[in-house]
Image (cartoon, grey):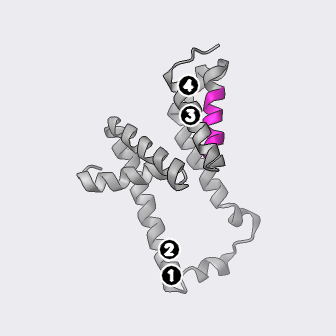
């Protein structure tokens, strides 16, 4: 059985906090980490650490493209995306956010110590402001613009 250390209690407190604030996605994620931590799956935490973000982005991207795959988003719908200024602005914002995410990944790779601050900020946003944990990549991108890295 895994050793009960401080990280266990932090994860447990985070799971409770997210449950109390009705953030089911993060509650589930933390409980999944506790499952890994407390079982023989613990040996796969380094794999999850190394590839989890990539796998998560792949799943998120696939989920976003389901309307293309199931036919509910057709060529007419795509062309309508260029018909109003709000839709065009949405496209521009999507491009900017995607670019910021890339800068965030680069910054985190170059300065791993920054990750702790981004994680803490994201956890505070998730726990107290009903945020979702996609923040570290975008936050890293914004931070890279602020500190001139990237």
**The residue stretch that appears in magenta:** 26-35
Where is residue 30 shown, x and y percent of the image?
60, 36
Q: Is residue 117 left or right of residue 124?
A: left
The disc at residue 66 is: none
State the separation of the CA atoms marked 1 and 2: 6 Å
Where is residue 59 shown, x and y percent of the image?
63, 49
In the rendered image, residue 29 lying in the magenta stretch gets the answer: yes
Residue under label 4, please give it: 8
**Disc 3 versus disc 1: nearer the observer:** 3
Residue under label 3, please give it: 13
Where is residue 113 shown, x and y percent of the image?
33, 35
Q: Earlier in the sequence, mark 2 or mark 3?
A: 3
Residue under label 1, please give it: 86
Is there a contact, CB below 8 Å, between mark 1 and mark 2? yes
**Disc 2 versus disc 4: nearer the observer:** 4
**Disc 3 versus disc 4: nearer the observer:** 3
The disc at residue 90 is: 2
Q: Earlier in the sequence, mark 3 or mark 1?
A: 3
Camera-side residue of 122 and 87: 122
Q: Residues within 10 Å of mark 2 (few under 14, many from 20)?
A: some
Which residue is at a point 62% across and 49% down the rendered structure image? 23
Would you identify the image quadrant in which residue 77 lies?
bottom right
Q: Earlier in the sequence, mark 2 or mark 4?
A: 4
In the rendered image, residue 9 lying in the magenta stretch gets the answer: no
Is there a contact, CB below 8 Å, between mark 4 and mark 1? no
């Amino acid at each position: 059985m895994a050793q009960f250390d401080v990280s266990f209690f932090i994860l447990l407190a985070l799971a409770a906090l997210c449950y109390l604030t009705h953030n089911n996605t993060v509650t589930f994620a933390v409980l999944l980490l506790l499952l890994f931590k407390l079982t023989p799956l613990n040996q796969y935490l380094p794999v999850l650490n190394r590839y989890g973000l990539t796998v998560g982005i792949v799943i998120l991207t696939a989920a976003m493209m389901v309307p293309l795959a199931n036919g509910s988003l057709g060529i007419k719908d795509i062309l309508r995306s260029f018909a109003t200024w709000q839709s065009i602005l949405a496209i521009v914002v999507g491009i900017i956010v995607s670019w910021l995410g890339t800068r965030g990944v680069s910054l985190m790779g170059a300065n791993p110590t920054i990750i702790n601050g981004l994680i803490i900020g994201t956890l505070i946003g998730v726990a107290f402001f009903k945020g979702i944990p996609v923040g570290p990549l975008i936050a890293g991108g914004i931070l890279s613009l602020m500190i001139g890295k990237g």
